[in-house]
Amino acid sequence: MRQERNNIFANIDWILVFLFIILVSFGWVNIYAASKTAENNHILDFSTKYGKQIIWICLSVPLIIIILFLNSKFYERFASIFYLVSIFSLILLFPLGKEINGAKSWFGFGGMSLQPSEFVKAFTALAVAKLLSDRQYNLKLVKNQIKAFIIIFLPAVLITLQPDAGSALIYLAFFFVLNREGLTLNYILIGSAAIILFIATIFFGSSWVIFSLILLISVFVGYAIYKGGKRFIRFNWHKIVAIYLISSLYILGTGLVYNNIFKQHHRDRFEVLLGLKIDNKNIGYNSYQSELTISSGGLTGKGFLQGDITKGNFVPEQHTDYIFSTVGEEWGFLGTSSVIILFMFMLYRIIYLSETHTNKFGRIYGYSLASILFFHVIVNIGMVIGLLPTVGIPLPFFSYGGSSLWGFTILLFIFIRLDAHKNYDW
């Protein structure tokens, strides 16, 4: 038993490893298709995007071995230190960071760049798992909820200030984890209501939404009085008034922020998404070209390296955030469906293994991993097919970039390491 415990490859879930290899390999194939040119078509040309990605993939192997070599207890014991170091790395970006596309999100090392926010997700997941797995920690207490919110939103705020709002949005995924561990569903319901009111305010304007809210509440109150009579009037009227006042203030604040604080290009993105404005040549160009590229693939696709829209470089950043459009054009509906099925199977496998953990730390970390992956996949694919605004979120294991690949590799293989020894007494 001890010999098996000391073997870093003992009890590893090879299904997850196999899914990782498939996704990374197919991702590289599509990076090659999206970045290959007539001048640069040698697979081992390391000056190209696909050549550099090969280097990152190869460097992932020793990284994986190191992660698996460390004892499972190591990640729980030093979770807080990992988290603090990652926060410090985000702070250092402000004086030392390299600005790319208007955001100070990168550290430059010669010809190489690293994006700390891609690694902070894993260390935040460890910190959340460490906090919530404490035997004396009760998530139903408000003071404990505040502690969890601080751990989750501190990196999100620092990332937003870079500014990189897309990467900061990912931290909302941790609410699924908190809900699994006992946090009331009201937070998610309130968040969903806030999103609906935000969109409605943009679409119809503050005045119409507030007036509609009055009608809705009036109908609800009338029905409740009819059913509950005086008892409802005596005990619930103040809650109705409070909900209305808070909602109205939120709607007015949303209109004020949207019209006076949001920059024009931010407003344009929302208005294009909601159909209030058609702009296929400027703000909506990326989404329009991406949708056109995917739809041109049909059922089976045009074939590997046969995508004429991909070859023409009509989709900006196609090798990174819009890599899914390459899959759609060259591999068609069958290819895109297969990718989604692979991701869904990986998520199912992670959740299934998490539920079998005897150690609470491993279960919470597993749910954090699944939530982050789910959020990335949904937002990225939704963005590429035009259902969501462009926010600059990579597709896990697919999009070009060493930071993204390493960040998700660390996230996944820490879980694989924890899962491998879940039945041992740490």
Image (spheres, rainbow, N blue to C red):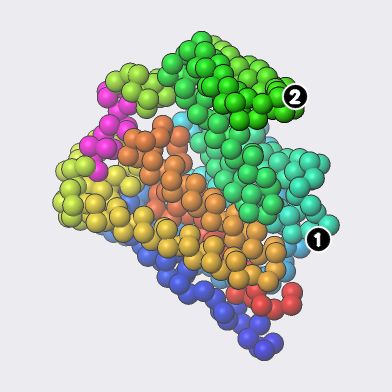
For marks 2 and 1, the one nearer the N-term is 1
Which element is circle 2 on?
helix
As helix, strand or loop, the secondary structure at mark 1 comes to loop
In the depicted structure, whether residue 380 falls above or below residue 410: above
Foreground residue, 6 or 422? 422
Quarter holding residue 117: top right
**Which residue is tagged 2?**
234
Residue in view at x 54 percent, y 35 percent? 192
Residue at the spot 58% in from the left edge and 34% down from the top edge: 191
Number of on-image labels: 2
What's the magenta region?
Answer: 280-294
Q: Residues within 10 Å of mark 2 (few under 14, many from 20)?
A: few
Most foreground residue, 220 or 390: 220
Q: Which residue is mark 1?
A: 135
Q: Position of residue 341 (x, y in %)?
A: 36, 59
| Residue 284 lies in the magenta stretch | yes
Instruction: Look at the image and tell me whether residue 93 can be seen.
Output: no
Please state which amino acid type lies under the numbered disc 2: Arg
- 388 lies above or below 371: above
Q: Report if residue 295 is visible in the image.
A: yes
Asked if residue 314 lies left or right of residue 126, the reply is: left
